[in-house]
Image (cartoon, rainbow, N blue to C red):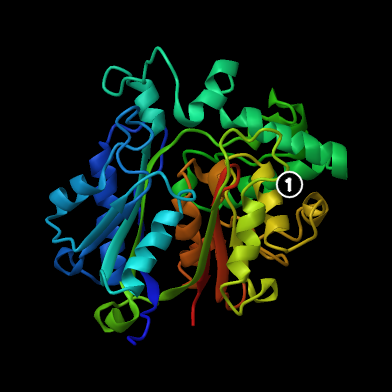
């Protein structure tokens, strides 16, 4: 029986991050791809796989304007394997699928990308017309008829339950946003998002969006492309970078109807991740948790066992534990709240930078070797365990 090949992240790249950029989505994508190739020391001729989430979104191009086939065409890639689909357990599952393709010998070097153009698309509706329909189906049937198109509507319900059941306060919830702001200010790629320090008073006095979330609890539409290159363990002699192994992956999909669902999909994803590895929470040096809304990281802390269920808000109280120099540095690049809505891939990108000591001013102290990156947390959730061996 053939030995299973390990999959490694060998290159990372990220385009300019901005709000209402004029550079084209393909231009941003190519900027990030070239940066990742240079980081890895690879060429287009060596790439034989491409993956993305969720593929090109023809209904609303701002959400996902570039498809896998377009990247293959633009770059002249001779692909043996490719995947671009949304029906997987959240965004980072595209990276997990690419790792599986490598492990089973279907590819040796895979470009994984996520390009978002939501801010620019909203500013230029004539170029990126929003989807207009007379009826709804799929997952939108559970939200659109109730004017709950924004995920804020249903995430807020979970957060409110945490407040009522476990005593979470807005002052505790604020620590996610305050931490994101501090780290975003140290991230050169976040200049368009985090421009000045945020205080607790400013947070508490800001406009409420949907109780308990205020303006600073929510990420904002952003334009950017983020790329990770995955390589086979027996092809590492072809790269110049420090490889980061994908030690384990996990994901879960629940019903989108979520009729009074007790828990988000993250609570199933966490235990499943640890079941696939000998690593434990004690080995983890940093976590990069999806924070489309500030409540998500609290659920991931609980779901992955860094604290008991119902204790996440107490774990982050005061902010010292999750600071860059704290016990468990969280979202060291600013996350989506502090560095822009990069829709999941930014967390894997930041984790690799930290583990390979490429994070510059925001580099965490010591010798970080293990990180967890996550995406989603509602009906969809995915997690990656990354290790520098």
State whether residue 331 is above or below residue 212: below
Residue at the spot x=42%, y=33% of the render? 19
Q: Position of residue 218 (x, y in %)?
A: 61, 35
Mark 1 element type: helix
Residue at the spot x=69%, y=57% of the render? 303
- Residue 149 in view here: no
Q: Nearer the viewer, residue 176 or 89?
A: 89
- Residue 261 in view here: yes
Q: Position of residue 352 (x, y in %)?
A: 46, 66
Please tell me in which quadrant of the rendered image residue 263 appears. Answer: top right
State whether residue 23 is above or below residue 388: above
Q: Position of residue 24 (x, y in %)?
A: 25, 36
Q: Residue furthest top?
A: 134
The image quadrant where one finds the N terminus is bottom left
Residue at the spot x=62%, y=45% of the render? 181
Q: Position of residue 153 (x, y in %)?
A: 64, 27
Judge left or right: residue 81 versus residue 299: left
Q: Residue furthest front?
A: 1
Q: Nearer the viewer, residue 139 or 366?
A: 139
Please give the count of numbered marks on the rendered protein: 1
How many neighbours does mark 1 have within 10 angstroms: few (below 14), some (14-19), or many (20 or more)? many
Disc 1 marks which residue? 175
Judge left or right: residue 224 versus residue 284: left
Residue at the spot x=69%, y=25% of the render? 210
């Amino acid at each position: 029986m053939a030995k299973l090949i390990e999959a490694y992240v060998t290159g990372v790249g990220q385009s300019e991050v901005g709000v209402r950029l004029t550079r084209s989505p393909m231009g941003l994508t190519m900027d990030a791809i070239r940066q990742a190739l240079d980081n890895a020391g690879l060429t287009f001729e060596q790439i034989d796989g491409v993956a993305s989430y969720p593929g090109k979104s023809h209904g609303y191009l701002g959400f996902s304007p570039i498809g896998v086939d377009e990247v293959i065409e633009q770059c002249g890639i001779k692909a043996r394997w490719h995947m671009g689909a949304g029906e997987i357990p959240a965004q980072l599952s595209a990276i997990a699928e690419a790792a599986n393709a490598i492990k089973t010998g279907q590819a040796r070097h895979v470009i994984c990308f996520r390009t978002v153009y939501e801010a620019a698309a909203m500013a230029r509706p004539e170029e990126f017309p929003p989807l207009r329909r007379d009826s709804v189906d799929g997952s939108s049937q559970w939200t659109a008829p109730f004017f709950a198109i924004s995920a804020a509507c249903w995430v807020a319900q979970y957060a409110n339950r945490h407040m009522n059941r476990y005593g979470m306060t807005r002052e505790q919830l604020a620590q996610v946003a305050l931490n994101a702001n501090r780290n975003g200010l140290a991230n050169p790629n976040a200049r368009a998002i985090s421009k000045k320090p945020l205080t607790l008073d400013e947070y508490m006095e800001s406009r409420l969006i949907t109780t308990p979330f205020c303006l600073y609890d929510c990420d904002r539409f952003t334009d950017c492309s983020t790329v990770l290159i995955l390589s086979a363990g027996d092809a590492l002699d072809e790269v110049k970078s420090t490889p980061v192994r994908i030690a384990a992956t996990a994901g879960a999909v629940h019903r989108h109807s979520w009729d009074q669902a007790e828990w988000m999909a993250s609570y199933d994803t966490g235990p499943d991740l640890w079941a696939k590895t000998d690593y434990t929470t004690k080995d983890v040096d940093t976590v990069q948790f999806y924070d489309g809304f500030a409540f998500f990281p609290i659920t991931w802390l609980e779901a992955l066992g860094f604290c008991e269920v119902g204790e996440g808000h107490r774990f982050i109280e005061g902010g010292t534990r999750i600071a860059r120099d704290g016990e468990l540095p969280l979202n060291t690049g600013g996350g989506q709240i502090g560095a822009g809505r990069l829709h999941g891939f930014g967390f894997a990108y930041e984790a690799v930078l930290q583990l390979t000591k490429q994070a510059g001013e925001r580099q965490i102290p010591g010798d970080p070797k293990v990180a967890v990156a996550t995406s989603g947390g509602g009906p969809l959730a995915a997690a990656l365990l990354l290790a520098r061996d």
